Image (cartoon, helix red, strand yellow):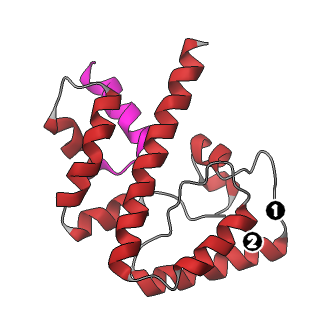
Amino acid sequence: MAAEPAADRLGLLFEGAPRFTERLRSLAPQATEAELIDRAETLARDLPEQELVELLNAHPRIGTRPGSVSALSYREQGYDRDPGTAELQSRLDRLNAEYERRFGFRFVVFVAGRPRSEIAALMERQLEAGREHELRRAIGDVIAIARDRLRRLEQEESG
């Protein structure tokens, strides 16, 4: 796997997060993308909190304006299936602000095809969680998102 395509693809899988993807690549420069994702969870456990927050904040807010998200996030958040309502948008904006104020990082969740209304209810419940729990849960979801993105990219490439 050449260095540049790996960097581009890892950037897609982890929504940017340059320090994280660079650290990940440096662990095993010859590893496949799937092997790197397997190592990502271990790497994340040992990162300073500032870098974990950076990794989470690389992801777009749930319900952020469709034009400001990557093509992968656009599909994952369901903009292509359900544009939502002004009321739902207002609720998501309020919940994102409240969540970030409480925890100091963005709410990240593996959407997995669920409607944004369901994700809003989940975000509301997660506001009751402890910060450390929420940080670890969100990092686990970042890894799940990367795995799912790689799976879908590989399916698209294989035709």
Element type where label 1 sits in the image: loop
Is residue 121 within the magenta segment?
no
The secondary structure type at the circle numbered 2 is: helix
Residue beneath disc 1: 84
Say whether residue 156 is left or right of residue 28: right
Quarter that holds the C terminus: top right
- Residue displayed at 17% across by 28% down: 29
User: Mark 2 — residue?
Assistant: 89
Residues packed near mark 1 inside 10 Å, few (<14), some (14 to 19) or many (20 plus): some
| Residue numbers of the magenta segment | 1-19
Mark 2 belongs to which amino acid? Gln
x then y, percent, for residue 46:
17, 59
**Residue 88, percent from left and from top:** 78, 72
State whether residue 15 appears in this view. Answer: no
Image-based side of 8 in relation to 29, left or right: right
Which quadrant of the view contains residue 124?
A: bottom right
| Residue 132: percent from left, percent from top | 32, 77
